[in-house]
Image (spheres, grey):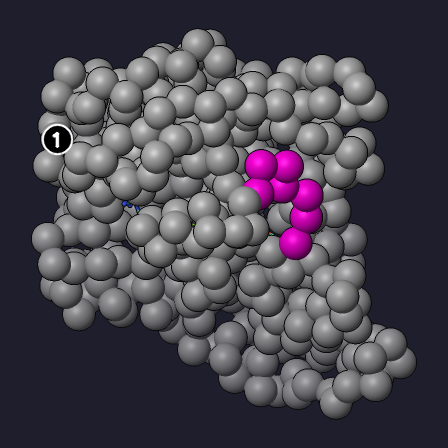
Amino acid sequence: MNTCVVGLQWGDEGKGKVVDILAEHSDIVVRYSGGANAGHTVIVGDDRFALHLLPSGSIRPNTICVIANAVVIDPEVLIKGIETLAQKDISLNGRLFISENAHVVLDYHKKEDQLREESLGKNKLGTTIRGIGPCYADKVGRSHTVRMGDLRDLETLEAKLQIIVEYKNKIFAAVYNAKPISADEIFEKCKFYADKLLPFITDTTEFLHKSIAEGKSVLFEGAQGALLDIDHGTFPFVTSSNSSSLGMPAGCGVPTKLVDKFIGVAKAYTTRVGAGPFPTEQDNEIGQYIRDKGNEYGTTTGRPRRCGWFDAVAVSYAITIGAIDSVALMHLDTFTGLKELKICRAYKINEEEKTFFPANTARLSQASPVYETVPAWDEEITEVDNFNDLPLNAQNYICRIEELVKKPITIIGVGPKRNQTIFR
Ligand code: GDP
Ligand code: IMO
Ligand code: MG
């Protein structure tokens, strides 16, 4: 059984928790897109792990972990992740496989990300400044790139870095009037990365196909969410990869035909970090209530997340383009204490009701949500482990969302811990 888990909103839906739970029954967990812009939280007992590049299966000591070709890897973050786990006696030796074709995020990418955001002023995208956009741009541009496999041949890499850094420094000076960076310093860091990471670097496509042929079960872990997809999201307020499940096959070389199930993860409401349209945003006391009770602050950047009502138009779109089979709905517990809840069932655009999400920022910014209002509940539900024991209004909320998005909700989150999860 091979399963793919993806975000159905603008990221931070709770993918890390879902993947950690499902990893118990998987042999291999694969990250296939994005980079250290991701922050996936896994809570095990009193330990809280924030994973940026390592798959969320890495906490389980026997799970094989793959970082596939379309992930952009910041080796510094990855090495730190490996060391953080080692401090908890969780070793990745012999069970971490990193694609030789994955592109490397280096200091000049992070510098470019920051300089560009600063130069955009009030028009900035609100990126995570992890160098993601510049690294993917170099990948598509092809001429000035470093891939993980390049760490094997340091002599060639040193010469390559001289050319790349000279080129980058010309841009930094001419466009941003910024100080140059040193190719030698970056090369010294690369020697360190090679020393730490070479044992893990391999052909992950070959490894995955061999494993699947042997009958191993694979769990594919999406990063970000469908609405941040470079082609299908709310461009330009998106990330630079295909973060919907459409990015999975190209992201790791395994066709979707070999995936048995696509699980989409959404929150019972909506959040977004960074700029861009957000039709159901509640920039008011409701949004603040959700932020406080749901602890809605970024895992990677610590930024307060923008919060709003559940948007069935947006989630249905993510389900449609992603061929999603079932939904995990997280953070239901966050609603406890509110009087009533709103669900966006359609958009009004130019006096017309629409239920197909317009993934075009100009059209989306004209959309006003059409809400239906349902009653909430007062009971804390963080200890509930059975759907039928939820307050009736909570059960009705779940059932109404199922009707609107036309898919079963098979996993319900009622708290951040592993056991605070209801399966149906
Ligand atoms: P990801 O990027 O999709 O993996 O999500 P993040 O880890 O960035 O953000 C999700 C946050 O919600 C984390 O702090 C999780 O510990 C927490 N979380 C996940 N599921 C639930 C839930 O059902 N209820 C509550 N209260 N917190 C949850
Ligand atoms: P996970 O995997 C939430 C957002 C950034 C910004 C936009 C572009 O934890 O769900 P980037 O640094 O990628 O160029 O930023 O995308 N973003 C995320 N938002 N969760 C994420 O990942 C995100 N990764 C990127 O906030 O709006
Ligand atoms: Mg996150």
> Farthest residue in the front direction?
339
Q: Which residues are magenta?
A: 275-281
Indicate the quadrant containing the C terminus: top left, top right, bottom left or bottom right: top left
Q: Does the magenta portion include 383?
A: no
* Left or right side of 303 for 24: left
Quarter of image, res 269: top left
Task: Look at the image and tell me whether residue 346 can be seen.
Answer: yes
Where residue 180 appears, as percent x and y from the top left, is: 74, 87
| Identity of the residue drawn at 57% across and 80% down | 187
Magenta-highlighted stretch: main secondary structure? loop
Q: Residue at x 49, y 35 (%)?
A: 309
Q: Tell me residue 192's x, y (percent).
A: 43, 78
For the N terminus, the quadrant is: top left
Image side of residue 250 versus residue 341, left or right: right
Against 4, is 195 above or below?
below
- Residue 277 sits inside the magenta stretch: yes
337 or 6, nearer to the observer: 337
Q: State which quadrant residue 25 falls in.
A: top left
Residue 62's x, y, as percent? 16, 44
Instruction: Say which of 347 and 150 sits in front.
Output: 347
Residue at the image point whose x is 56% and y is 62% from the top: 128
Q: Residue at x 63, y 28 (%)?
A: 369
Question: Which class describes the residues within 10 Å of circle 1: few (<14), some (14-19), or many (20+)?
Answer: some
Q: Amino acid at mark 1?
A: Val
Q: Is residue 42 left or right of residue 234?
A: left
Along the viewing direction, whichever of 97 and 168 lies nearer the viewer: 168
Q: Which residue is mark 1?
A: 384
Mark 1 and ligand 1: say if the CB distance to the nearest ligand atom is below 8 Å.
no
Question: How far from the left and from the top, in percent, is residue 234?
Answer: 69, 39
Query: Is residue 198 visible to the viewer in this orientation of the structure?
Result: no
Q: Is residue 23 above or below residue 286?
A: above
Q: How many marks?
A: 1
